[in-house]
């Protein structure tokens, strides 16, 4: 009797009929949808024969043989590879949200290819797989290092994977903006397209996938022992650490060779195992087999949708990576339905924190931050490089320098203040120090509307963009509230809902990147906070908006003081908790939208500024709000100044520098939490 059978006493569970029926039907329907346009020109027999031969006198037959058949074969091969990789990953980590996408492996593979393109092109000539595998190992190594002590808590794993993806993506974008002439085509490719014009890529990838898959399947019996827990598996002779390392290395290798061929095809490795489990796959063998087939069906369906969308849009490329990314958000939420995460949220301590900064005089702290901000303003306006080296601009000439330096500096400071206040509201309301507008998807909702405006070509002006971004943030917020309502706006559901919204924003970005050209460059500049686009009118409009919204935050002092006492105590003191949380989230959304229009959605200032306020000893709500606003303004003022200097005469987006620093800070925060 096999060991798998002994694990499922008193009898082996019977596989439900719906599992094979659904997966096979999915594959067949995807195949038929893919073949449908060609059946108008070729008979079914001619179309099937296109996989091995073609009629040179018939153009449709040639096109089917060299384009449709290899593309369909590539979709099936890569879908199988990613489905198997996702199932192995979830088994190794015991986490229903683990996948190459949520662990950052795919973004790591693209990062490796990017670095090799710039600094070691000879390595790509030797084999692009080496660079992709190295990048994938870097990404998954960071995620595992950060979440190991938390037992790979599902929420923590996807947060760590998301921020690793943020961080590596920010580096990628910095390189793209600086070296666009070298990397432009690379990022069009990186959006994930399966379009083919011959069979060579398929036959190059096939043996590699088969070899890695065979090595994965040799681990089935040892992996079954992991279901008993680490202690029992070790007692039965399994070397758990070595087993996990080997399996994850194979997952990275499989994912990276795929990324090196077709770019980032996200979330197939998550969707396939989730579908197999929901349809009734119970044993490891069943999950691996049906996840592999489900991955093929899912990716072929997504690729067919991308093909149809490309055709209907007049030939504008819609990469497969876009359509697969669109399924990621719903799959994440579906995977967590009914799943109870026993681990604490990042930032939620099981015991009082060992680190409690001493309280400091708020006037001294505000004075210090204001003085540093004033120094930054003076340096930014006066001391900068020019055609003849570094120059000092006297105060009497600031009126001339204002046109070039003033509005962008003013907008950066105001955006930082808005994010500092928004971050404080969110962290106080959720009780989670790792919460921020970026991680709750509010920034992503505003950004998604901006992406849609760019794609449709609508020019609404800055005021119209602000209004649209605010609507996007509120729309994201409304969806977030629907998702979290039955959990009374708990931290878990808020963060997971925000992640799902980020996934949709990422799909829009992939679509824009695939278009290339000036639209992609302009939008990417804005996404990462290009303050040089700000005019004087826009800067003063933002001033009025931030001052008005900042005044409204004064009304939140009592609610934010009572909410940490718990819902029961706050209600007993006369606070209507659900309504209060809703109003606080709306205010945070408005502040976030105002800053997102200026600095982009990925700055992480909303995460860092409230923490700096606490480090400076500002523990009460009002003091923390003021200190966080000043700290946020200071952070983005410094970022804007450095963005002008670091690569002069070129410029980096200020938000990009803030994202790099913020990503490092978040990773450090997760790692510190794991050590508590």
Image (spheres, helix red, strand yellow):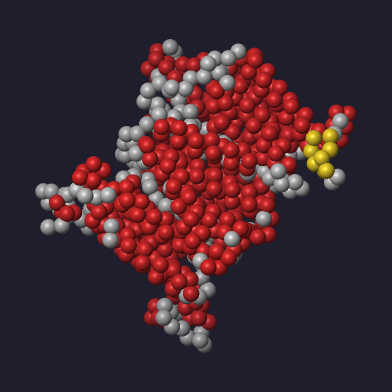
The quadrant of the rendering that contains the C terminus is top left
Q: Where on the picture, by quarter, is residue 95? A: top left
- The residue at the point 66 percent across, 22 percent down is 369
Picture mark count: 0
Is 146 situated above or below 211? above
| Res 147 visible | yes
Q: State the residue in front, 144 or 444.
A: 144
Is 270 situated above or below 413? below
- The residue at the point 71 percent across, 43 percent down is 646
Does residue 490 appear to the left or right of 277 in the view shown? right
Whole-percent x, y for residue 381 in the image: 79, 33
Whole-percent x, y for residue 447 in the image: 59, 43
Q: Residue furthest right?
A: 396
The quadrant of the rendering that contains the N terminus is bottom left
Q: State the residue in front, 99 or 589.
A: 99
Q: Residue furthest bottom?
A: 57
Is 554 situated above or below 519? above
Does residue 438 appear to the left or right of 372 in the view shown? left
- The residue at the point 29 percent across, 48 percent down is 240
Q: Where on the picture, by quarter, is residue 292? A: bottom left
Is 543 situated above or below 220? above
| Res 268 visible | no
Whole-percent x, y for residue 415 in the image: 65, 32
Q: State the residue in front, 302 or 140.
A: 140
Does residue 207 appear to the left or right of 649 in the view shown? left
Q: State the residue in front, 486 or 259.
A: 259
- The residue at the point 38 percent across, 47 percent down is 98
């Amino acid at each position: 009797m096999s060991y798998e059978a002994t694990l499922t006493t008193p009898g082996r569970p019977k596989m439900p009929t719906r599992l094979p029926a659904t997966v096979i039907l999915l594959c067949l329907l995807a195949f038929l949808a893919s073949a449908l346009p060609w059946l108008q020109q070729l008979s079914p027999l001619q179309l099937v024969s296109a996989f091995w031969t073609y009629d040179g006198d018939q153009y449709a037959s040639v096109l089917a043989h060299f384009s449709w058949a290899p593309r369909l074969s590539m979709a099936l091969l890569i879908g199988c590879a990613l489905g198997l990789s996702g199932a192995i990953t979830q088994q190794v980590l015991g986490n229903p949200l683990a996948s190459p996408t949520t662990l950052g492996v795919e973004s790591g593979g693209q990062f490796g290819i990017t670095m090799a393109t710039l600094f070691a092109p000879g390595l790509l000539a030797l084999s692009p797989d080496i660079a992709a595998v190295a990048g994938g190992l870097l990404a998954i190594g960071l995620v595992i290092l950060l979440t190991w002590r938390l037992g790979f808590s599902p929420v923590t794993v996807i947060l760590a994977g998301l921020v690793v993806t943020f961080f590596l993506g920010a580096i990628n974008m910095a390189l793209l903006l600086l070296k666009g002439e070298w990397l432009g085509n690379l990022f069009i490719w990186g959006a994930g397209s399966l379009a083919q014009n011959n069979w060579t890529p398929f036959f190059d990838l096939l043996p590699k996938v088969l070899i890695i898959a065979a090595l994965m399947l040799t681990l089935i019996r040892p992996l079954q022992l992991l279901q008993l827990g680490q202690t029992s598996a070790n007692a039965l002779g399994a070397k758990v650490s070595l087993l996990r390392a080997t399996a994850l290395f194979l997952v990275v290798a499989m994912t990276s060779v795929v990324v090196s061929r077709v770019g980032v095809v996200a979330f197939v490795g998550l969707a396939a195992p989730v579908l197999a489990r929901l349809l009734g796959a119970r044993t490891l063998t069943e999950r691996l087999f049906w996840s592999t087939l489900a991955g093929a069906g899912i990716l072929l369906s997504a690729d067919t949708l991308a093909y149809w969308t490309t055709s209907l849009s007049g030939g504008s490329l819609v990469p497969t990576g876009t359509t697969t990314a669109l399924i990621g958000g719903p799959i994440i939420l579906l995977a967590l339905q009914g799943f109870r995460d026993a681990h604490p949220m990042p930032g939620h301590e099981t015991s009082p924190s060992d680190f409690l900064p001493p309280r400091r005089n708020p006037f001294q702290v505000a004075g210090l931050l204001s003085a540093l901000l004033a120094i930054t303003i003076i340096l930014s306006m006066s001391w900068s490089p020019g055609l003849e080296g570094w120059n000092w601009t006297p105060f009497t000439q600031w009126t001339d320098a204002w046109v070039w330096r003033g509005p962008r500096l003013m907008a950066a400071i105001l955006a930082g203040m808005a994010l500092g206040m928004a971050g404080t509201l969110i962290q106080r309301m959720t009780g989670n120090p790792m919460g921020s507008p970026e991680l709750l998807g509010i920034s992503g909702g505003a950004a998604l509307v901006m992406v849609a405006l760019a794609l449709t070509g609508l020019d609404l002006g800055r005021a119209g963009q602000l209004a649209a971004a605010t609507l996007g943030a509120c729309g994201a917020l409304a969806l977030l509230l629907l998702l979290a309502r039955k959990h009374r706006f708990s931290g878990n559901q808020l963060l997971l809902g925000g992640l799902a919204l980020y996934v949709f924003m990422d799909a829009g970005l992939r679509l824009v990147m695939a278009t290339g050209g000036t639209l992609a460059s302009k939008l990417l500049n804005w996404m990462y906070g290009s303050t040089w686009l700000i005019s004087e009118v826009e800067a003063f409009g933002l001033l009025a908006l931030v001052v008005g919204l900042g005044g409204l935050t004064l009304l939140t002092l009592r609610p934010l003081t009572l909410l940490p006492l718990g819902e029961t105590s706050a209600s007993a003191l006369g606070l209507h908790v659900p309504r209060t949380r809703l109003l606080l989230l709306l205010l945070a959304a408005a502040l976030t939208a105002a800053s997102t229009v200026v600095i982009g959605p990925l700055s992480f200032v909303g995460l860092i500024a409230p923490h700096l306020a606490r480090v400076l000893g500002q523990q009460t709500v009002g003091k923390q709000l003021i200190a966080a606003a000043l700290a946020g303004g200071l952070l983005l003022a410094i970022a804007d100044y450095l963005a002008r200097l670091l690569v002069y005469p070129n410029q980096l987006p200020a938000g990009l520098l803030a994202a790099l620093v913020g990503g490092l800070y978040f990773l450090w925060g997760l790692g510190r939490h794991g050590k508590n």
